[in-house]
Each structure stands twice: as structure tokens, then as C-alpha cells.
Amino acid sequence: MRLRSGVFACSCLLVEALGVALFLRGFFPVPVRSLPRREARGDPPAEPAPPGPGTVSNWTKIPPPLFRKVVIVLIDALRDDFVFGSKGKQFMPYTTQVVEKGTSYSFIAEAKPPTVTMPRIKALMTGSIPGFIDVIVNLNSPVLLDDNLIWQAKTAGKRIIFYGDDTWVKLFPKHFVEYDGTTSFFVSDFTEVDDNVTRHLDRALKREDWDLLILHYLGLDHIGHMTGPNSPLVGPKLREMDNILKKIHISLLSKEGEASLPNLLVVCGDHGMSETGSHGGSSEGEVHTPLLFVSSAFEKRNGPLTQPALVQQTDLASTLAIGLGLPISRNSVGNLILPVVGGKTMREQLRFVHLNGFQLSRLLRENTPAYEKDPGYEHFKIAEKSHGNWIKLYLEGNNSEILLNLGKKVLKQYLEALKTLSSSLSKQVAQYDMYSMTVGTVIIMEVLLLLLLSVPKALSSRAEFEVPLSTPLFSLLFYLMCLMLCAVHVVVCTSAESLCYFCSMSWLTAVGVMILISALMCGILSAITKILENSRLPLKNPVVSGCSWSEIDVLILAGTIGHVLSLGASSFIEEEHQTWYFLINTLCLALSQELCRNNFLLKECHPQHSTTVKQNFDSMGEASEYKNIDIPEAGDSKLGKATSSADFVKRSDKWISLASPWIILICCRLLRSLNQTGVQWAHRPDFGHWLTSSEHKTELSFLAAVSLLMIFSLVQRRCSLVSKIAMALGLLGVYSYRAAIGNVIFPWQHDSKDISKGITEARFVYVFVLGIIFTGTKDLLKSQVISADSSVKSTGLWEMYSGLVLLAALLFRPHNLPVLVFCLLIQSMMTKYIWRPLKFDAAQITIMHYWFGQAFFYFQGNSNGIATVDVSAGFVGLESYVEIPAIFLTAFATYAGPLLWAIHLLCYLSSEVSRLASSGCQREKLPLLGDGDYFSF
């Protein structure tokens, strides 16, 4: 079957999408769910029936509420050490006193990844464990339809007031009798988001027309995003939160004399923050948050404060449901925090844990086919039977010590059953559909291998090739593979205890997928056989016979395949930056060897090759000569001087070319020490932390100024005069913006007290970014519409690239500006001293750009965890949260490294076309992988 490369690429893309969809469906597990919310309310379970006839328990309703009013204060990004550590004692004295000597219970709540706000609110209110897909939904939170505490409270007639993060308003619309939401994404605002909550507090505390008050403070999270957990701004914000907690606690205590039930104050965080101030990952600082219950119903603490016990964040939903006299959410996997109800009678405590265990066992029964074999379910049934025996003794009026000891024993059995049930349900949330993932992975790898085998023909001048499918489809191997895969499918789907998505598909669809896998495999085998047959044929051209794969080709192929295979292990994914650092370092060593061989070792053995390399350097020298030296027509002495200077340029280019790989290695080593990333060593101090500390602001300012000057010198060389002026003014605006927000200082500044949001300065830079990009776009359109001039097209691409470099300089934090400098420097050196002298083909240069782009993604300090995403970049120059610009700026700042290298690839290929065209080679061809295939410019 003969196909054009475009048709072949589209077909591969469609099949690849099928494989990716199957893999993602298996990778993102289906959450544990019970009945829809409309059907969630029903009659609560009664107490376990006592054995024997004649005795029946009369407690069949939900227990009454334990607290009259409940106030939940959620402080965004509140780490546990902010309350229980040294910062808590220093900046939150009242809270520390309540924790150590007051009527309170303190815990450390463990949040499950992803540690971002919307999934954490879901976990707190539903008791379920949201998945990673909620990270995307976090940008635009939809209505929460699952059974949850807020819905149960509203249905029961509770009056709820909310002030704070508007994510709550989006999740629970029409649930609050009064609310005032504040956008959570404008991270450069530290004060107004909290003042907007506190301004309602005095009036709300004086009122009596509410049962549940929820306050969500965002300022601490914004400070973490912008300046990190060790910022001097953290202390005053914690002191502000301490004063607010003091006001609420005193107000609740003052009203308890009039009521029969006590009030409850709950202090918690939705997530913590990492050492860089971000969140989303699974480091200890991100997943551990404080959880405080403060009420006069608890016993006063006397002894010294011990290490708080560890509970799950999902436990709060079950505990608050019991405290408010509400049914536990049906999808909750949390356990009741027993000390909160420890002051009640034994019968009440047993009733509470029985309700929790019944809800968990029902959820397990609805989501697990073999639920009866689950250890947690078995333990619950044993505890329920013992509970019935205890009730029988209780109803018979037995009040001896035996009854109390038996009650404690039953309570212990229930707690063990709750723990096991919760663990089983939590594991089910993280249980991957391995069969669907395997099928998707096989399809993806087959398509990638087929593309790899087809690259030489697809990129040839004809861009047309024969797809080897007709013969394999009628071969015996094809039918045998189909039968074998169908047999495997039947065995897997009939023996699996848990449901599999691919098994739930119709048999016709499954057989179609098996046929597709078999056809792709046979096509790959046929293509490999054809390549091997062609390699055995005698070559007509003796020159081509010496052209085999070089060490660079083997390294590029082995490195790319090795990286793909390494992604099968989670440890390699967590530390993927180490793989890329190793690959580019090895590439630099291989390039150094290639340059030495071409300049020294091949002169004697291959004179023709030596002549070719000399011509490559001659062309470099001529380009420099024509660009920088004006040779007059008169005077032989002047002509001789110009010739000698040209020879000097050629010799200097040769030695610079030999030194280039080692200079690049030094640059990469410096960049590695700038930002620690990954998981294992991310906590270790690096040069970036040293620069961003407040004691080294002068050094950071000097480094930023020097970096901006070097960026200008590296970018302006191919820009027009107007773009050069715009670039200079834009880079000056970048420094002014960073000085305005207090990151750097001008030489005449002694401090940075006058800190602003820098909106005017940032918009000043945006004007020049758009102007430079517009100039480049105009040149591109001119080259396509008015005149087909390749030099105009090359200039337009470079100016667009320069505009994006200016945008990256604005969005990068000051300590990361050297990353941008080294990016431009390495690109310039590779272009002039490595790629052109060695005449690499387009495929090799493309893969090298890809390698360096990935490495620079990690040089920025990024990782495969969302905790390293710099959200503050999305709000540079914005007065309020605007969704599309914020998403674009955040994405660009995160992936600036790969994007700049990808655009530089286009600039390089276009400049090569322009260079060849200017030298009269309108149809010169660059060799690609494979014998006899060329990419035509």
C-alpha cells in the first residue's frame, strides 16, 4: 500500500490516540462511589440486634448533634510545623497555648496527593479520595454532585455561612444562606483576600442565625507561591491568623452559658507547602497539615504537649457528621476520630463507630465483587456480633465492671475493623487497571516503532513510501497472533476479580483492537525484514558504502529508546532529570570525540574527508569575513592583510569548535547546581536558595543585571534595528518589574520598602513583546505572500523567537535568568561551531534539540510533580484573575525550555535554507537517516 507521508502520519496519530486513551483510562483509577446523592438519604441502621428472642434495641435513629455551633477555619497551605513547630510558638502564641493547656485535641492530618485546593476540599467534605484528574478540574471547579457534609447539613435544615475561596461557592452553589467568595488564583495578593473574609467576622459572630460557619483564608498560600515558606512575610501572616482564631474562640466561649450544647472550633489546612512554596506533590511538607478541635466539651490538657497523632484528612468528614448529628457521607472512606467523642457514654461511642463501620462496609460491598473475603468486612461482622452481645447485657440492666470492659473490647474491635475497611477502600482508589494500561502501551510502542522504521522514507524528497501491510494481513503469523491475543483476552477477563474497562467493552470492539495489534506487529516485522534484505544487497556507489551509522547516530537512537524504557519505573520518572543530564553530558563527550576525529585523526587516513571539513570551516570563515570585513578593491597589501585575518578567523573557529563541547559541559554543570529538583534530593540546598534569601539580594540583583545584558547581546545580533531597541527597553522593563515587586534592587536603593505588584512595569514589557512578535509575523507573511525570500522568512522567525525570549525573561524568577542565558549561549555555540562544521543532518539536529529542551525543562527547577509549577508566573501584570492569560503564562513559563529549543530548531533550519540559497545552492540537499534519502530545501 503506497501512502503519502501526511496520510501515514494522520493514521498513526489516530491509532496513537487510541492507545493513549486506553492507557489513561487504566492509569486514572475509577473513584470509589456509592449511590447518587438523590438516593443517599435513607433510614439509618439500627443498633445490632441482641442474640435471642425478646430483646430489641430501641435506638434506630441518627444520634443527636454533639455541638450547637461549629466554626471551621481553613487556612490554605498551613503546614503542621507552622502550628506545632518553632514558628507556631513564635508567631501563634494563643493557638499554642490552647494546644498545650486548653480544652483541645491536636492531630496531624495527612492529605493524599494531589495536594491542590479543590481535591482537598472534596476530601474534607465528602471523606473520599479524589484522583489526579481533579488537578485539571481544579482550574474551573464544577458542582460537586457526590454525597457530602454540606449537602447533608443543608438537607437537615442547618444554616451555613461561608466567606473565602470561591471554590466552595462553585462546588456547593445554593447551599449557603450567606457567602462572599474571593478568587484563589490571584497569587500576588497577600492581604485583600484575607481582609475580605475578616471584614465579615465581627458581624457573623454576633449573629445567632447560623449553625455552621466556614472561613477559608488564602493569604498564606499566596505568600508561599510567591516567596516560599521561609519568607519574612510568613510570620506576620501567622500572627494575623492567630489573632483571628483568638477572636473566634473567645466569642464561642462567651455564648456557651446561654446554650445547652457546647460549640466547636475546627482549625485545619487543605494542604501544606513544599520547601519552594508550591504544592501538589507528596513531600512531607505538602501532605502534613494541622487539625485542631477546640471546645469546652473536651477535658483540659495538663501535661506537656506530645507529638500529635497522625490521622487521615478524610476522617474529618465522618467526625463532623457525627458532631452535627448528620448521616456520614456514603462515599466517605474516613474513620471517626474517637477522642472527639470520647466524653460520651460507652453506648453512644459504640453507636457512633457502628454507624461509621456500617457505612464503610456498604461502600465496600457496592464496589468490590468479593467483599465478603475482605478482612475489614470480616472484622466488622465480628465486632457487630460482639456489639449485639453487649447491648443484650446493657438492656438487661447490667452495670458492672464486666460490661465496661466488654464495651472497651468491642470498641477496640470496631476501631480495628474501621482501619482495615478504610485501608481496603483507599487501596482500591489507587488500584490501576493494568490490563487496559498494557494494551494501550503495546499499541503506543508499535506505532512508535513503525514511525521510527519509516522516518527515512517519510522525510525523503518524495515523501512517499510503501507501507508493508498487504502481505502480512494474509500471512499465517497474522492469524496466529489474532487467535493468541483473543485467547489471552478471554483468560484475563474471565479470571479477573475486579472489573476491567477493556473487559467491559463489547467483544466486537475488543476483537477489532486485537486485529489492529496483530496487523501492526506483522507490519513491523515485514518492515524490519525488508531493511535487512536491502542491507545485504551490494552497493553501487563505493562512496556510500563507507557511510555507516556513526557513534552519534547510535548514541541518539540508544539514548532515546533507553529513556522511553526508563519511564516504566516510577523511580526513573521521579528522577527523570538525571537521565537527561546523563544523556546531554554523554552527547557532549561524543561531539568532542567527533570534532577531534574530523580535525586531526582523519587528515591522514581520509584526505577527502579532511578537505570537506576544511571547506566547512572555510565557509564559516567566509561568512564571518563577508559580514565583518569590508575588502576594498585597491591595494594588494590590504588584500593580503584581509586574507591573513580571514585565515586567523578560520584557525580560531577551529579551536573554539574543539572547545565548544567542554564549554557546554561546564555550563550544564553550573545549571545543575542552580536548582535542585526531583524527589530524593529536592530538599537539599542549592545556589538558587542562596540567591533568593533576603541576605543576598545585592548578589541576586547583580546576577540579574548581568544576565539581562548577556541576553541582549546574544539575541540582538540577527534582529532589525527596531527590534533591537524594543528588546533593550523590554529587558530594562524586566529589571524594573522585579525591582518593583522587591526581588531585586537598583544601585541607588538601600532597601525595598516601596513594594508594589509591578503591574505597570510588566505591561510595559508586554507591549515590547507583542511589538517584536508582530514585526516577526509581518516578515513571515511578507516572505509567503509578497516575495519568496528565504532570508526574510529566517529573519521573521528569529524576531518571533526574540520576542518569546523577552517574555521568558519577564516570567522567570531572577535567580533563573542564568538558565535563559546559558540556553542562548549553548544554542549559539552548537549552531556555529558544531552543527555546521560537522554537517549534521536534520534528523540528528532535531533529536539534539529535543534532548537539550528536555534538559532545560529540569534546569529551570521543574520536575514531574505539579508542586514545582510556578503559579505566580500566570499573574505577572494582571490586576485580577483572568483565566486564559493566566493559564497561558503559567504554561509558557513552565515549558519555556522545550519551547525555546523547538522554536530555535525552526530558526536554524530556516537559516540553513537562507544560507544555502544566498550561496547559490537553491536545491542543495541535507542528508537524513537512511541510504539515499534526502530532505530537500
Image: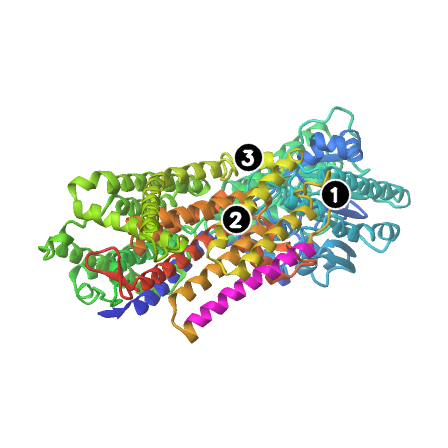
- Closer-to-camera residue (700/423): 700
> In this view of the protein, can residue 60 be seen by the observer?
yes
Query: Where is the N terminus found, in terms of image quarters?
Result: bottom left
Query: Where is the C terminus found, in terms of image quarters?
Result: bottom left
Q: Position of residue 889 (x, y in %)?
A: 57, 56
User: CB atoms at circles 1 and 3 under 8 Å apart?
Assistant: no
In the rendered image, the vertical position of residue 787 relative to residue 115, given as above or below: below
Q: Residues within 10 Å of mark 3 (few under 14, many from 20)?
A: some
Give amino acid for label 3: Phe
Q: Position of residue 928 (x, y in %)?
A: 26, 57
Q: Give the mark nearest the N terminus, 1 or 2.
A: 1
Q: Residues within 10 Å of mark 1 (few under 14, many from 20)?
A: many
Q: Is residue 37 left or right of residue 665?
A: right
Residue bearing mark 1: 266
Residue at disc 2, secondary structure: helix
Which region is colored magenta? 759-783
Q: Give the mark nearest the N terminus, 2 or 3.
A: 3
> In this view of the protein, can residue 499 be seen by the observer?
no
At 55% from the left and 54% from the top, the residue drawn is 806
Give amino acid for label 1: Val
- Closer-to-camera residue (785/356): 785
Residue at disc 3, secondary structure: helix
Q: Mark on residue 117?
A: none
Residue at disc 1, secondary structure: strand
Q: Is residue 2 left or right of residue 541?
A: right
Q: Give the mark nearest the N terminus, 1 or 3.
A: 1
Residue bearing mark 2: 711
User: CB atoms at circles 2 and 3 under 8 Å apart?
Assistant: no
Total numbered labels: 3
Give amino acid for label 2: Ile
Q: Mark on residue 687?
A: 3
